[in-house]
Amino acid sequence: MENIKLPKKTINKPNNTDINLALVTVTSESFVPGTLVMLFSFLEQHPTFQGDIIVIHDNLALKYRKQLESLTKIIFRQVSDELKSHIQRLVTYYPKLATRQARFFSLETLLVQNYDKVLFCDSDLLFQQSVDDLFILNKPLICCGDGPYYQNNVRDEESFSILPKNTSDKKTLSNTFNSGFILIDKSLITDQNYQGLLALLNEKTWKNNTLSHTDQVIFNRYFSGQQHLMPCTYNYLLRYRTMLHKLDQSSFKAAKVLHFNHHKPWQANRMLEAVVNDAGLLPAFRLWNEAYFACIKYLAMKNLNHKLMQ
């Protein structure tokens, strides 16, 4: 990440095809550093990307919006009252979800219409290579597996708990996927599907769910059977680093997209906890911090050039 050459306008039409794209993410005050790095690394790896970047939030303070806008042009989208009311009813029933409410905001991706494809990205991703090749695939929903998938397991549809693949006495979800990196075709981005997602935000869905999953439950249940899974390198889940390395013998350093789906590298105490328990994660945190400082350097130079031109 040494060469910092972001153009003023970024977002990509791959292979000269006429594809109208948008990148969508969710952020909050505590996730702004992660959002900056995710967007910076995406733009660095996709220097000709010409779509929109949309950030879903819940009353994000103006100073944080300005920080993000200092990187590139951003469309800020306030999360809808309709979704918030559904989330609040669920939290009333299941109070453990109170601190995870923002994780449901990704459902609003289904309201980002008028695009051929929409790429939803969690704010704890780091792009190391381009993912242009995904944009031309003729698949309705492109994503990567979750932990149970890589363990050759399935999930109980009702509780979302992990079950052996040969389970026959329960209705299960197979080929389950992580919801932090999803490319959605316009054929799925409809009001009807959005309402279908909201309909799953209810007590029944979480009745027997003892796990901490949020939007991942909804996406997997609603779009079961429509997902097209790509290799783990497109969404390399660092929480399962050791397992993924055994499966395909590739290091996370070679992954197209790193996903810090457990400890967040901008939270020093969590990072310390992680490397104490698994020193092998240190190189991944180093990669994120290199991108972070490259982003800061880019913003500082951009600000300096702006002042000199005044």
Image (tube, helix red, strand yellow):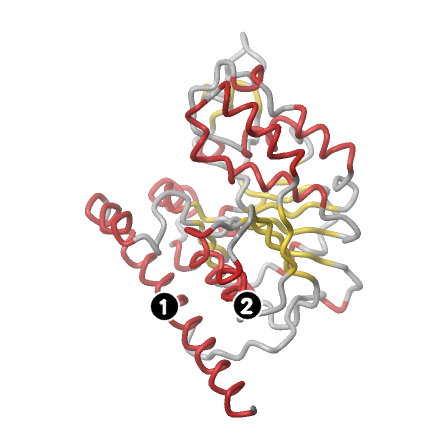
Residue 243 screen position, x and y as percent: 37, 40
Q: Nearer the viewer, mark 1 or mark 2?
A: 1
Seen in the image, is 94 located left or right of residue 287?
Answer: right
Considering every residue shown, the one lying at the far left of the view is 276
Circle 1: element type: helix
Reply above or below: 169 against 65: above
Q: Quadrant of the N terminus?
A: bottom left
Q: How many marks?
A: 2
**Residue beneath the point at 77% across and 53% down:** 116
Label 1 amino acid? Glu
Q: Residues within 10 Å of mark 1 (few under 14, many from 20)?
A: some
Tag 1 residue: 290
**Residue beneath the point at 77% across and 46% down:** 186
Nearest the eye: 159 or 207: 207
Q: CA distance from mark 1 to mark 2?
A: 15 Å
Label 2 amino acid? Gln
Circle 2: element type: helix
The reply to whether the C-beta atoms of the residues labelled 1 and 2 are less than 8 Å apart is no
Quarter where residue 76 is shown: bottom right
Tag 2 residue: 45
Quarter where residue 216 is shown: top right
Nearest the eye: 268 or 289: 268
Q: Earlier in the sequence, mark 1 or mark 2?
A: 2
Residue 244 screen position, x and y as percent: 40, 43
Seen in the image, is 115 located left or right of residue 281?
Answer: right
Seen in the image, is 198 located left or right of residue 57?
Answer: right
Q: Quadrant of the C terminus?
A: bottom right
